């Protein structure tokens, strides 16, 4: 039903607009730049399984350097076309965008973009005026579905009907009777199975308004049935009049939880209500962060896999080394056994499986030492000495290897964090170069190819005017902290948590506590602890930083510092 309000929004703002540009930021997304005499709007269409939708957007997703084939096909048919109609299949989650354009020889042609918003079955399908599929974001063949195939040159057919009722067309009596037939279901589940295009959230809300809670249909009294009819009538008028409100629910951490076209009372005061001017603005804010992560995941799939494999491999190696180190902890027993055998060999004989001797390290208590019957007492003593020296050497080597492994694991976790925070292809390329220089992946660039221009750090300004710089990755962290920053600037980093280096530029002023707190919030936000409530952030003057010889990128040490606990934020 929320799609009905979006349909009206698109119709009012974009009908008659011309498609000036078309992009495909990710495999399941399209962005149409629609221009009219009054300006331009970007229409985002997503068939992503976890965030399918259509709305205007103010965000500009970065486009791949080489447009996908589907994008090129869409440009061929839709660039220059006029949006002539916006249609919805009753109240179902299917929207049709009709375009009038012209082909290569100038003849007028019509195309329809079918947007199906159905979770994992979501799709974007281009159809010509003969109702033939030109292509789709997701091609569905016979191996994926025996009921409905979506392939070029095939005739377009609607998804199988669900036998649900359109609240705008069905009478109240028919709606109530159909709901009452679902006797053993909760009221919200019954509404969900009867009404077209309704969300579980709205179904629960109607149950809350009707009964004060979600009850079984067969427990409804006549009074509650009348109240249900009244609630459905109000819902119908809201849709008919287009009087829905763009409502978002946020938790105490200001994280978006859900959205609707009507006020939600079922959560009481657990969530904060925020109203937006338009449904597009609502969806833009709700999905922006999730989309950033999804796009990065698609573009950096190989990097994510390499980092994950490296972290897993390093962790396994560390666990084995720690187990071996524990086995070396008994080396002193080997030395004592060797000395006791050596001291008592005059009374020991070859051929025994063990020897009982006095342990002068433990008040001369008798101790039984296993020995090799094939060896003499002297040879058994040397055997224990050899095992002792081997364990001692192994302990020293393992301690060094474990320290190196822990440092490598910490470094890989910082790369994983930078990868999670990356939002542009340029940032991913810098991380790719960093991993290639470290030997974790192969170089993609050919010899003699021009190096990419270095990205600047992220930049913020505190409320009292201090410039705050944030490193995007480990190589940039090194440049920022060890080259760019002045010795009197202030350096911040989450305590023992992977994250960005943050610099407050002093600019010959005393840095205020307010600027430190704001920079600490930014440091916490640009770290692995972004979703935490309170995060410890260390801060110290840049002059206190040192780079250990041979340390991995982004690694610095400091001993003089202060710590502040903050809530992650960039506001």
Image: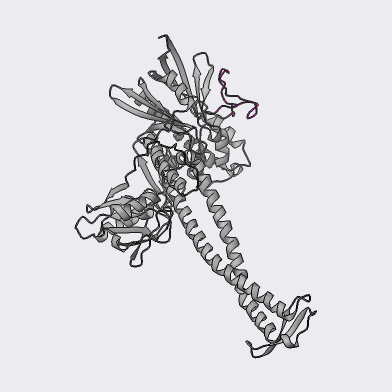
Q: Is residue 290 magenta?
A: no
Q: Is residue 158 magenta?
A: yes
Q: Position of residue 262 (x, y in %)?
A: 42, 39
Q: Quadrant of residue 539?
A: bottom left
| Residue farthest bottom in this picture | 363
Q: Position of residue 207 (x, y in %)?
A: 51, 43
Q: Quadrant of residue 175?
A: top right
Q: Viewer-proximal residue, 248 or 41?
A: 41
398 on left or right of 532? right
For the magenta stretch, what is the residue range?
138-163
Q: Viewer-proximal residue, 179 or 322?
A: 322
Q: Is 239 located above or below residue 543 in the figure?
A: above
Q: How many marks?
A: 0
| Residue farthest right in this picture | 351
Q: Is 113 located above or below residue 129 in the figure?
A: below
* Residue at 50% over, 19% down: 127
Q: Position of residue 390 (x, y in %)?
A: 62, 70
Q: Viewer-proximal residue, 406 or 563?
A: 406
* Residue at 43% over, 61% down: 496
* Residue at 22% over, 54% down: 464
Q: Is residue 264 visible?
A: no
Q: How is the image coloured?
A: one colour
452 on left or right of 161? left
Q: Viewer-proximal residue, 311 or 263?
A: 311
Q: Is residue 492 visible?
A: yes
Principal secondary structure, stretch drawn in magenta: loop
């Amino acid at each position: 039903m929320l799609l009905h309000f979006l349909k009206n929004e698109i119709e009012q703002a974009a009908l008659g607009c011309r498609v000036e540009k078309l992009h495909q930021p990710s495999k399941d997304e399209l962005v149409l730049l629609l221009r009219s005499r009054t300006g331009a709007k970007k229409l985002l269409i997503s068939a992503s399984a976890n965030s399918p939708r259509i709305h205007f957007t103010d965000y500009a997703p970065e486009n791949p350097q080489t447009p996908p084939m589907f994008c090129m096909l869409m440009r061929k048919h839709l660039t220059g076309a006029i949006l002539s109609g916006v249609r919805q299949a009753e109240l179902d989650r299917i929207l049709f965008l009709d375009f009038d354009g012209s082909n290569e020889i100038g003849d007028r042609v019509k195309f329809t973009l079918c947007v199906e918003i159905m979770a994992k079955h979501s799709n974007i399908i281009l159809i010509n005026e003969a109702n033939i599929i030109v292509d789709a974001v997701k091609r569905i063949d016979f191996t994926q579905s025996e009921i409905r195939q979506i392939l070029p040159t095939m005739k377009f057919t609607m998804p199988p009907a669900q036998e649900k009722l359109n609240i705008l067309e069905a009478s109240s009596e028919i709606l109530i009777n159909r709901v009452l037939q679902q006797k053993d279901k909760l009221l919200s589940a019954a509404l969900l199975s009867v009404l077209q295009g309704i969300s579980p959230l709205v179904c629960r809300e109607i149950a809350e308004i009707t009964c004060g809670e979600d009850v079984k249909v067969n427990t409804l009294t006549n009074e509650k049935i009348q109240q249900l009819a009244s609630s459905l009538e109000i819902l119908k008028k809201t849709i008919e009049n287009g009087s829905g409100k763009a409502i978002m629910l946020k938790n105490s951490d200001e994280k978006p939880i859900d959205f609707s076209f009507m006020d939600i009372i079922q959560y009481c005061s657990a969530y904060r209500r925020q109203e937006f001017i338009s449904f597009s603005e609502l969806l833009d804010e709700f999905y922006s962060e999730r989309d950033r992560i999804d796009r990065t995941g698609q573009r950096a799939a190989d990097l994510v896999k390499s980092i994950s494999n490296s972290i897993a491999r390093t962790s396994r190696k560390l666990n084995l080394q720690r187990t071996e180190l524990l086995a070396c902890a008994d080396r002193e027993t080997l030395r004592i056994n060797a000395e006791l055998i050596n001291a008592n060999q005059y009374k020991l004989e070859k051929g025994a499986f063990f020897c009982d001797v006095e342990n002068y390290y433990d008040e001369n208590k008798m101790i039984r030492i296993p020995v090799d019957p094939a060896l003499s007492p002297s040879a058994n003593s040397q055997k224990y000495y050899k095992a002792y020296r081997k364990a001692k050497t192994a302990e020293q080597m393992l301690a060094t290897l474990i320290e190196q492994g822990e440092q490598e694991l910490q470094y890989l976790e910082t790369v994983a964090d930078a990868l999670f925070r990356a939002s542009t292809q340029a940032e991913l390329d810098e991380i790719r170069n960093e991993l290639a220089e470290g030997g974790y992946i192969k170089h993609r660039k050919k010899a003699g190819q021009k190096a990419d221009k270095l990205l600047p750090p992220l930049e913020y300004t505190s409320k009292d005017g201090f410039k705050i710089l944030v490193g995007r990755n480990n190589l940039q962290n090194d440049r920022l902290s060890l080259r760019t920053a002045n010795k009197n600037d202030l350096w911040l980093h989450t305590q023992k948590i992977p994250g960005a280096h943050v610099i407050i530029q002093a600019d010959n002023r005393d840095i205020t506590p307010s600027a430190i707190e704001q920079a600490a919030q930014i440091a916490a936000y640009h770290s692995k602890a972004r979703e935490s409530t309170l995060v410890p952030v260390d801060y110290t003057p840049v002059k206190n930083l040192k780079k250990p010889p041979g340390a991995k990128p982004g690694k610095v040490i400091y001993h003089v510092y202060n710590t502040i606990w903050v809530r992650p934020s960039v506001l």
